[in-house]
C-alpha cells in the first residue's frame, strides 16, 4: 500500500503544480489584451493555455483521489518481449519505409510494437494498426502533403 500512496502523493503534487502554473498563466495573460476568437489579442494564447493546464491539473488531482489504494506489486525485471517488439517495429518501419512506402511502414511499426503489450491480442493490434494507417495517410500524406509515397516498390 505504501507504493500506491507514494504514487498518489506525486499525482497530488504534480496536479497542484500544474494547476498553479495554469492559474499563473491565466492571471499574467489577463494583463494583456485578450480579444475575441476572431480578433485575438496578445493575451489570448497565454490565458487559453493557462486554462487548459489548470484543467489538466485538476483532472490529475481528481483521478489520484478517485484511484483505489490497492497494493501494487512492481516488477523489477525488464519486459524483454516488449523491448524486442518495439525494436523490431522500428527496424520494420525503417526498411519498409524505404522499400514499401508509408502504408506498409506505418502498419508494420504499429502492429509489431502493439504485440509487445501483454494485454493486446493480435486482433486488437490489427485494428490499431489499420486505424493508425488511416490516420497517418490523412495527416501526413493528405493534409501535410509529405513527400512520402503511400506505396513504393524498391
Image (cartoon, helix red, strand yellow):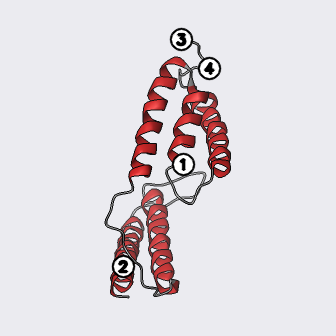
Q: Is residue 152 above or below residue 35?
A: above
Residue at (58% x, 13% y) in the render = 153
The earlier-in-sequence mark between 4 and 2 is: 2
Discs 4/3, front: 3
CB within 8 Å, label 3 to label 1: no
Q: Label 4, label 1: how many angstroms apart (C-alpha)?
A: 22 Å
Residue 57 x/y as whole percent = 44, 74
Residue at (46% x, 88% y) in the render = 69
Residue 154 is marked as 3
Q: Label 3, label 1: how many angstroms apart (C-alpha)?
A: 27 Å
Q: Which residue is mark 2?
A: 7
The earlier-in-sequence mark between 3 and 1 is: 1
The answer to which quarter of the image holds residue 131 is top right
Q: Label 2, label 1: how many angstroms apart (C-alpha)?
A: 26 Å
Q: Is residue 39 above or below residue 71?
A: above
Q: Label 3, label 2: how many angstroms apart (C-alpha)?
A: 50 Å
What is the crowding at mark 3: few (fewer than 14 residues within 10 Å), some, or many (at least 20)?
Answer: few
Discs 2/1, front: 1
Asked which secondary structure carries label 2, the reply is helix
Residue 40 x/y as whole percent = 52, 53
Q: Is residue 98 above or below residue 20?
A: above
Asked which secondary structure carries label 1, the reply is helix
Q: Which residue is mark 4?
A: 151
Q: Nearer the viewer, residue 14 or 113?
A: 113
Asked which secondary structure carries label 3, the reply is loop
What is the crowding at mark 4: few (fewer than 14 residues within 10 Å), some, or many (at least 20)?
Answer: some
Amino acid at each position: 500500500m505504501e507504493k500506491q500512496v507514494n504514487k498518489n502523493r506525486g499525482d497530488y503534487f504534480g496536479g497542484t503544480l500544474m494547476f498553479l502554473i495554469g492559474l499563473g498563466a491565466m492571471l499574467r495573460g489577463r494583463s494583456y489584451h485578450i480579444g475575441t476568437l476572431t480578433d485575438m489579442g496578445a493575451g489570448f494564447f497565454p490565458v487559453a493555455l493557462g486554462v487548459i493546464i489548470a484543467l489538466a491539473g485538476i483532472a490529475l488531482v481528481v483521478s489520484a483521489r478517485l484511484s483505489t489504494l490497492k497494493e501494487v506489486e512492481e516488477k523489477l525485471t525488464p519486459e524483454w518481449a516488449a523491448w524486442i517488439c518495439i525494436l523490431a517495429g522500428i527496424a520494420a518501419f525503417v526498411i519498409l519505409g524505404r522499400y514499401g512506402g508509408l502504408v506498409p511502414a506505418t502498419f508494420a511499426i504499429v502492429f509489431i510494437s502493439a504485440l509487445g503489450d501483454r494485454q493486446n491480442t493480435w486482433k486488437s493490434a490489427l485494428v490499431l494498426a489499420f486505424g493508425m494507417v488511416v490516420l497517418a495517410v490523412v495527416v501526413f500524406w493528405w493534409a501535410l502533403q509529405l513527400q512520402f509515397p503511400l506505396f513504393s516498390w524498391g
